[in-house]
Amino acid sequence: LFIYFLKERARRLDRQHSCPAPFAHSHSAHIHTPGGAAPPVTAAAKAKAWLCRKRGLQGGSFGCLGSCFSETPLLRKCDVLNRGLSGYNTRWAKIVLPRLIHKDHNAGNILAVTVFFGANDSALKDENPRQHVPLEEYADNLKSMIGYLNSVDISKQDIILVTPPPLHEASWEKECMAKGEKLNRLNSVTGEYAKACVKVAEECGTDVIDLWTLMQKGNQDFGCYLSDGLHLSEKGNTFLANQLWTLLEKKLSALPQLLPYWRDVDHLYPEASLLGIPTTKKQ
């Protein structure tokens, strides 16, 4: 999944990038400022890129994860663009990334981009060869995507990698068996991909959220973070949102609020409050 945070001044409500289904299953995405209903984020959602502009003109939320941000300073400050590609791995994502993010987006307005892959790449080769990507290639693909983002003037400081979350094998095995399939992922294998993701972030100088480790910290029962053993539950989305917010808060704190809180709007002369147009009061 790819998500962009755009920080350009608001002049109009750009509906071109509205997101009908941000954060759905494994995917790649852009996110405009919170707005529009959407399915929950999934653990398999491999890559996420967030573009936020200084012009979030809409309230609302974008799925379970988005709802965690809907009441934050993101409102009236940023556009969050989300492009989700269910079931994709890094091999496919790096091919389509140039279609999702390019220089026309004006990199100077991009506040942050997140890249979230690994749950599909780490599928077992013998049981799921379609989605499986070898560990070394997975790391190379992440580096390739970071390199591409750098080439379109998105600096490493503005890129956030997210590792795959842990796999709850017992729960996911039930899902596989219901489809007449064998367990096609292992938590230990997913952990190797998470470690590779962290290593890539260290080598490339980007931020990283190690979901795999954080969700298992203290030997806690991480099953509550997953709806089916693989995909994030509402609680899992909230957990990830909190981790993201620790990285985004400082970036967003300096952005101005573009539109006033509704109680601050002059209901008799709304143009003055909303458009900054001087209004001559009638005598």
Image (spheres, grey):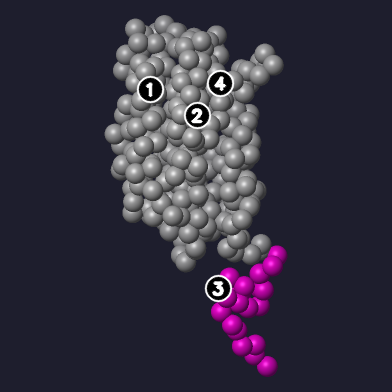
The picture places residue 229, in percent across and down from the top left corner, at 54, 17
Q: Gap in Å between the C-alphas at discs 4 and 3?
A: 46 Å
Residue type, mark 4 in image? Trp
Q: Are the residues tagged 1 and 4 within 8 Å (C-beta)?
A: no
Asked whether the viewer can see residue 75, the reply is: yes
Depth check, mark 4 against mark 3: the one in front is: 4
Q: Gap in Å between the C-alphas at discs 3 and 1?
A: 48 Å
**Looking at the image, how many numbered discs can be counted on the residues?**
4
Q: Which residue is mark 3?
A: 275
Which quarter of the rendered picture does the N terminus lie within?
top left
**Residue at 51%, 12% in the rendered image:** 187
Q: Are the residues tagged 3 and 1 within 8 Å (C-beta)?
A: no
Residue 277 belongs to magenta span: yes
Residue type, mark 2 in image? Glu
Give whichever of discs 4 and 3 has the lower sequence position: 4
State the extent of the magenta-drawn residues as a range. Answer: 263-283
**Residue at 35%, 10% in the rendered image:** 125
Asked whether, in this view, residue 34 is left or right of residue 3, the answer is: right
Q: Which residue is mark 1?
A: 138
Residue 35 belongs to magenta span: no
Q: Gap in Å between the C-alphas at discs 1 and 4?
A: 16 Å
Give whichever of discs 2 and 3 has the lower sequence position: 2
Disc on res. 212: 4
Q: Gap in Å between the C-alphas at discs 2 and 1?
A: 15 Å
Element class at badge 4: helix
Q: Gap in Å between the C-alphas at discs 2 and 3?
A: 45 Å
